[in-house]
Image (cartoon, helix red, strand yellow):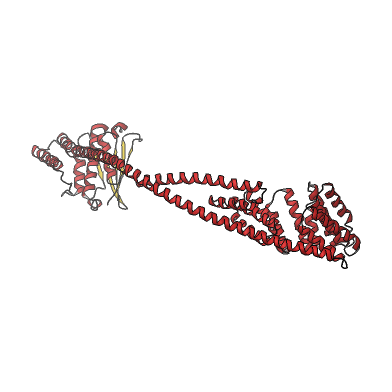
Amino acid sequence: MKKLLIIALATLLFSCSDKQTEAENGIAKTYYEKAKTDTTGSSFYYFNLAKNAYLTTKDSVGAAKALVNMAILQENKGDYYGSIETSLEADRYLGKKEDSISRQTFASNYNSMAICSSYLYEFEDCITYYKKALQYTSDKEYRYMILNNLGTAQITLKDYKEAIKNIQLALPTTDSLKYAMVINNLARAKNFDNKNYNPLPEFYKALEIRKRANNSIGENSSYATLSIFYFHSDKKKALYFAEQMLNAAKKNNSIEDQLQALQKIISLTPNNNLAYFEDFQKLNDSVQISRNKAKNQFATIRYDVEKKNLENQSLKLQKAEKEVQLLQQNIILGALSLLLISGIVWYKRRKKRVQQENELKIKENELRLSKKVHDVVANGIYQVMTKIENQENFDKEKALDELEFVYEKSRDISYEKPETKDTVEFAERIFNLIDSFKNDHIKPFLTGNSQNIWNDVSGTVQNEVFQVIRELLVNMKKHSQANLVAFKFEKNNNQIHIQYKDNGIGIPGEIIHGNGLSNTVSRIEKIKGTITFDNTTEKGLKVNISFPTS
């Protein structure tokens, strides 16, 4: 009954929980897709909502993906510390997962952390994160990009040989703009490593590829490289490329690149740089304001979303509490109904079971009395008949005494008196029993039947053994046509072994399973013994019996 209630409650709760989880999964995916396609500047907000929705459904990978995208948005807005903090949160949710989606998310996350570390001039951390990203990505083109970025960071740390080795691994890229970036950076690394190496063919080749693709961001990078290359050897060319860099930076609306270009121009025109310096100052102030604004905006969004999430959780909790109260009421009503029905069913079943048990007890009692009548009366009378038949000098008075004994035993059965240990020594009773079947045609033999083997055997066991031996003798007299019968008794390690042999015609299976010998088997089992019938000898029957003395 109690189990049924628990199962019913669990089923209801799991059903509600599954429906709620499906709905929340749908909400999380909706927020995530809206963030990816947003063009209004609200991507961070929707990714944050998606993250919280994924956490509600215990989808840690979904939450991590949303956080990685949030970190990339922070990186793009110059909130590098905030971006790394968000990436570390994503890393915690990913844990040690190894599925393909988790691995690619790991790679994107570490790549973002590496880029932020480079902007913060933490190049050792930058290299560490790029190497971690390489461990997780299986996409060839993405791997080439990370190898190039890793090499660029190693150039900054003047580890030119490692930089060359890693950048060369990115040369197989099939993306023309990536290829331009790779050959440009490889030429830089080779030139830094060996001043006699001429990087200009690769520099101009990279610039040409970028111009053909109308890639102003790439052009900006090429102009920066050329300006730095000519900085000490040809100030005029260095200034020219710095000015080209400024134009490209304005074209792609990159304030960061404009600041770098202005720094180069100011350094190259020390006597005529006031206008450039003022532009630099304005842009630098604008960048700082923009970055601070972005940091505050991201922090505000996260705070507002978390606040809203807590409010939603509170409302959900209140709603859930009301639903639980209603559910509890329904369960109590259902339980009472189920309890009433179960009580009626249980009462009827119990009544029927008690009736069946009583009928079974009556049948068992009848069977037990029938067995006793067979053992005591039928076998007792048969034994007296055998004595009268076999012993010529067996007088009438003795026969009457034995019949009187059988009668008294039958009265004991009717009064349910317990069996008691006979006053006559058990070995003598066994001898008298076997000897009573002796006549001119049947010669019984007996060995090992000394009283000392029976001393530790209880009266109940003795009575059962006595009946077993009598049943074997009655069966022999009725069915076996034997003229030689042998009993051997021995005691070994608190076990008594009885061996019976005759030279009759054996014993068919149907007789073994008849009332007489079937009772024999059940008697031996009752005293925790074993009995085997060996009917495979050339002639006759062999029976082995063993049972414990106590």
Residue farthest bottom in this picture: 271
Q: Name the one closer to the observer, 7 or 35.
A: 35
Q: Which of 426 and 406 lies nearest the eye of the viewer?
A: 406
Percent of width and height locating residue 438: 20, 38
Q: How many marks?
A: 0
User: Does residue 179 appear left or right of residue 289 in this picture?
Assistant: right
| Left or right, 18 with reference to 368 | right
Residue 434 position (above or below residue 510): below
Judged left or right of residue 423, residue 270 is: right
| Residue 128 shows up from this direction | no
Residue 157 vs 140, above or below: the answer is: below
Q: In x, y percent, where is residue 193?
A: 84, 62
Name the quarter where the N terminus is drawn.
top left
**Front residue of 31 and 129:** 31
In the image as oriented, which residue stretches furthest toward the left?
397
Q: Nearer the viewer, residue 18 or 39?
A: 39
Q: Tell me residue 265's x, y (percent).
A: 85, 63
- Locate residue 373: give its quadrant: top left
Residue 200 in percent (x, y) is at 89, 56
- Regarding residue 396, the answer to whether it shows in the image is yes
Q: Is residue 159 left or right of residue 477?
A: right
| Residue 516, picture quadrant | top left
Residue at 89% across, 65% down: 232
